[in-house]
Image (cartoon, rainbow, N blue to C red):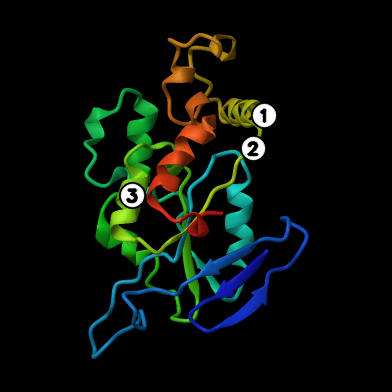
């Protein structure tokens, strides 16, 4: 993996061995100014790149490895979900797990920007929210706010990804009442909850991003 810093014009190799060689071109951004302050006024700092999922596809490992790079700043809060949840009524969810997840997330602008306040001007800032890939309005909201942001998508064989999700829920004693034997029943929650089967519909989920962002900004 190679992180190319467009703001400084040099290339820094990331430690090899955890991912196939890949080039990620980041433009350092904070409204075009140093994120610390300009004329004594602190500038807003937004992410330069966003990992959008999918869950159970190695996003946690990538977040961890990128966070070790001296020229990359990763949000200490994993899965803030800001672009998916800002303005959403927490009482609108079908499942109680989704409502609880809402309150574990960062759904207001000020605390979201706080996640990046310590990023240096010469660092590429990033965050990792798996909900972004599957939540339908997210791509449009990211595009409206950050048209130049880099998008990183990680995918995994869909059946393996779903079974890994099931094993995760099993370890945490959070397996849905509709057990894994209902996975082929299209009326079951396995087909309605965002983090289960529909998260593996990669073509449908990623199409929203490719329709709004240049393909050069998506890896």
Q: Quick check: 147 above or below 171?
A: below
Whether pointer 2 and pointer 1 mark residues with C-beta atoms closer than 8 Å, the reply is: yes
Q: Foreground: 207 or 72?
A: 207
Q: Quick check: 34 above or below 18?
A: below
- Which mark is first along the chain, 1 or 3? 3
Q: Secondary structure at mark 2?
A: loop
Image coordinates for residue 3, horizontal then vertical, percent: 61, 70
Determine whether, in the image, residue 156 is placed left or right of residue 215: right
> Which image quadrant: the N terminus?
bottom right
- Which disc number belongs to residue 104? none
Q: Secondary structure at mark 1?
A: helix
Instruction: Give the residue pinned by disc 1.
Output: 160
Q: Quick check: 1 above or below 29?
A: above
Image coordinates for residue 115, horizontal then vertical, percent: 39, 64
One can see residue 56 in this view: yes
Determine whether, in the image, residue 139 is placed left or right of residue 61: left
Q: Quadrant of residue 132?
A: top left
Q: Residues within 10 Å of mark 3 (few under 14, many from 20)?
A: many
Instruction: Give the residue pinned by disc 3.
Output: 83
Image coordinates for residue 118, horizontal then vertical, percent: 42, 74
Q: Foreground: 179 or 48?
A: 48
Disc 2 to disc 1, how far (Cα)?
Answer: 7 Å
Disc 3 to disc 1, how far (Cα)?
Answer: 27 Å
Q: Secondary structure at mark 3?
A: helix
One can see residue 106 in this view: no
- Which mark is first along the chain, 2 or 3? 3
Instruction: Give the residue pinned by disc 2.
Output: 156
Determine whether, in the image, residue 189 is placed left or right of residue 33: right
């Amino acid at each position: 993996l190679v992180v190319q810093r467009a703001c400084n014009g040099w290339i820094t190799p990331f430690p090899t061995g955890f991912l196939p060689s890949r080039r990620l071109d980041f433009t350092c951004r904070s409204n075009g100014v140093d994120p610390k302050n300009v004329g004594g006024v602190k500038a807003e700092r937004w992410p330069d790149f966003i990992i959008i999922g999918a869950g159970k596809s190695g996003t946690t490992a990538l977040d961890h490895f990128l966070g070790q790079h001296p020229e990359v700043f990763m949000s200490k809060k994993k899965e803030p979900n800001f672009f998916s949840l800002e303005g959403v009524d927490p009482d609108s969810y079908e499942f109680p797990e989704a409502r609880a997840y809402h309150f574990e997330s960062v759904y207001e602008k000020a605390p979201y920007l706080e996640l990046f306040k310590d990023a240096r001007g010469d660092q590429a800032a990033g965050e990792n929210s798996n909900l972004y890939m599957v939540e339908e309005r997210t791509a449009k909201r990211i595009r409206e706010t950050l048209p130049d942001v880099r998008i990183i998508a990680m995918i995994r064989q869909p059946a393996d990804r779903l079974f890994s999700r099931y094993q995760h829920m099993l370890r945490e004693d959070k397996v849905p009442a509709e057990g894994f034997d209902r996975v082929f029943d299209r009326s079951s929650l396995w087909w309605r909850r965002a983090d289960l089967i529909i998260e593996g519909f990669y073509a449908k989920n990623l199409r929203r991003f490719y329709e709004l962002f240049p393909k050069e900004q998506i890896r």
